[in-house]
Amino acid sequence: MKKIFLLIFAFFVLGLAGYFAFIYYVPFSEGYRSGELIKFSNKGVLVKTWEGEISQGISGAQIFTFSVEDGEQEVIKKLIELQGKYVKLTYKERYATFFWLGDTKYFIQEVVEEESPHFGN
């Protein structure tokens, strides 16, 4: 009986570890988005996460929300500096997220300032 309990417990732990590894390391998609950086903040009560938004149109009708992991300090610094500017974001979309990583499934890997197609910089 003890052996069966240990096997079930080991199977459960390995399954849980496999699920977490799959969600974290296997991207659903990777891509680029460009727009005006309209919001970037460190929010949360128990766990602080970096969240942001870019506007992909003149009227702000298309908003792309994203998260940045705490380990991406260079990306965080660039996003803080580029607030209100037109940027190009490189992102990785995951199948799901964990509350301690961010609110969205889109995680920014790189940010570059670009010239706005709507207004001259």
Image (cartoon, rainbow, N blue to C red):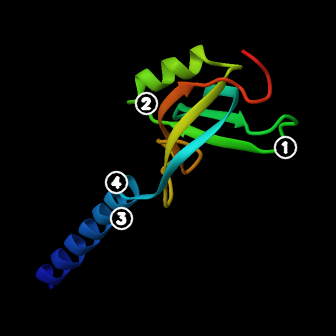
What residue is shown with label 3? 19
Q: What secondary structure is found at the residue carrying circle 2?
A: loop
Q: Are marks 1 and 4 in contact (CB under 8 Å)?
A: no
How many residues crowd around disc 1 within 10 Å: few (fewer than 14), some, or many (20 or more)? few
Q: Is residue 45 visible?
A: no
| Image location (x, y in percent) of residue 98 | 48, 50
Instruction: Compare marks 2 and 3 and give the one earlier in the sequence.
Output: 3
Q: Image quadrant of residue 64? A: top right
Q: What secondary structure is found at the residue carrying circle 4?
A: helix
Q: Quadrant of the C terminus?
A: top right
Residue 51 left/right relative to 22:
right
Nearest-to-viewer mark from 4 and 2:
4
Q: What secondary structure is found at the residue carrying circle 1?
A: loop
Q: Amino acid at mark 4?
A: Tyr
- Disc 1 versus disc 4: distance between alpha carbons? 32 Å
- Disc 2 versus disc 1: distance between alpha carbons? 29 Å
- Disc 4 versus disc 2: distance between alpha carbons? 16 Å
Q: Is residue 60 visible?
A: yes
Instruction: Compare marks 4 and 3 and give the one earlier in the sequence.
Output: 3
Q: What's the mark number on residue 25?
A: 4
28 to 105, vertically: above or below:
below
Instruction: Compare marks 4 and 2 and give the one earlier in the sequence.
Output: 4
Instruction: Compare marks 2 and 1 and give the one earlier in the sequence.
Output: 1
Q: Amino acid at mark 2?
A: Asp
Q: Amino acid at mark 3?
A: Tyr
Nearest-to-viewer mark from 1 and 4:
1
Residue shown at 59%/47% (left/top)? 104
What residue is shown with label 1? 61
Q: Amino acid at mark 1?
A: Ala
What residue is shown with label 2? 70
